[in-house]
Image: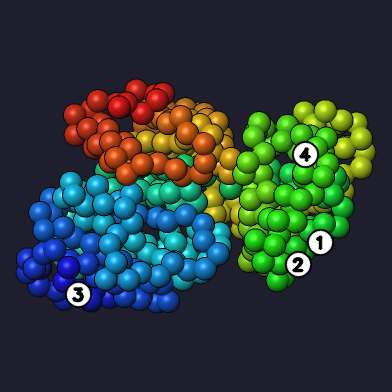
Amino acid sequence: MVAVALLGGCAQVAHKAPALPISATGTRDGAAYRVDIPAHWNHELIVYYHGYRHEPATYDKSKPIWPALDGLLAKGYALIQSGYSRGGWAIEQAYAETEALRRDFVASYGKPARSWVLGESMGGALAALTIETRPETYSGALALCGAIEPSNRILDQAFALRAAFDYYFPDLLGPLVPVPDPLPEYADMRKRIAAALAARPAAREALLRLYGVASEKNFPDIVAFITQILGELQRRTHGNPFGNADLIYTRSGDDFALNDGVKRYRADAQAAAYVARWYTPTGKLLRPLLALHDTGDPLVPAGDAFEYALTAERAGHGDNFVQQYINREGHCVFEPDEITRAFGELADWVDAGRRPVSGRLPR
């Protein structure tokens, strides 16, 4: 691979054909980036959004690209990705910084014949936001295990679960508002949660019913992760964006006691408005959006994406959204060839007008 530097924002660029292949890394306005262009570039560009990370991502050009994306490089697509200048729920930063990176790419290498957007988990929300707001730039979008329902919806659900956890296990994780900073190490927090759940099977089963999962396998990780993300968003918004004051808990198996005993919180309006801003989908899809999920995703449940389908239908753009799935347990546990196949469906949808069939990802 040949390492080059992007011409950050340079207005006067001679678009001389670059020597390929290219693997470029660097930093732009505090955000690391990576650019990969294969030797047989088809002059199309995929803009990739990574998912939630506690710290900004970094890139090493001496290391291969993430294997899940390698199949797309092999198909001839160029790929660019930003590490974002902030960790956490960085949708605000990621949206602006990735667009700036795309503009730099165009300034350095010329305007691609077509551009696509691809995102994973939180990056799936960014893919949906981008295809809704920049249809003049992108031909289509692929959201992988994407949190594409409204952010305040999925995060309020997480907050409500953590409040219920505190009802069954008071003081185990400290206060919920505000979440302590710093928190215990993740491994220690997970171990503490797992031990508590094992010691009280009835409470564990009630929480599993509330969350809507049958397996306890990943549940300690879920509780630990949502504790981290809730705390990060409280600090980011300088308040508490979440509430359960008007929620009636159901499906616990002991709803009367839970609703009488759970601690209630109200969201701070300004903090909640920030979460709604980043992001709430409009469903205004002028270009195709294909969403791929695994049925056993414990963190971003596959069924939640149906809310996006309804939003697109109400906006009059339901024909531009398709949801597909694979049968597997875990969060974002796709094989590289499944991502390549899904992207091929998206490209065929745009090229030939063959809308993918909703349901299981074709083999």
Q: Estimate how packed mark 4 is, as few (under 14), some (14 to 19) or many (20 or more) residues with alpha carbons within 10 Å.
A: many
Q: Nearer the viewer, residue 218 or 32?
A: 218
* Res 4 label: 3
State the CA–CA distance, disc 2 to disc 3: 43 Å
State the CA–CA distance, disc 4 to disc 2: 24 Å
Residue at (63, 41) in percent of width and height: 217
Of the residues shown, which amino acid type is indicated by label 4?
Answer: Arg
Of the residues shown, which amino acid type is indicated by label 2?
Answer: Pro
Asked if the residue at tag 3 contacts the one at tag 4, i.e. Cβ–Cβ closer than 8 Å, the answer is no
Nearer the observer: mark 1 or 4; the answer is 4
Q: Estimate how packed mark 2 is, as few (under 14), some (14 to 19) or many (20 or more) residues with alpha carbons within 10 Å.
A: some
Of the residues shown, which amino acid type is indicated by label 1?
Answer: Gly
Residue at (67, 66) in percent of width and height: 185
State the CA–CA distance, disc 1 to disc 2: 7 Å
Question: Which residue is identified by label 2?
Answer: 180
Q: Is residue 14 visible?
A: yes
Q: Estimate how packed mark 1 is, as few (under 14), some (14 to 19) or many (20 or more) residues with alpha carbons within 10 Å.
A: few
Nearer the observer: mark 4 or 2; the answer is 4
Q: Earlier in the sequence, mark 1 or mark 2?
A: 1
Residue 54 coordinates in the image, percent (x, y): 55, 64
Q: Is residue 250 visible?
A: no
Q: Earlier in the sequence, mark 4 or mark 3?
A: 3
> Is 349 situated above or below 38?
above
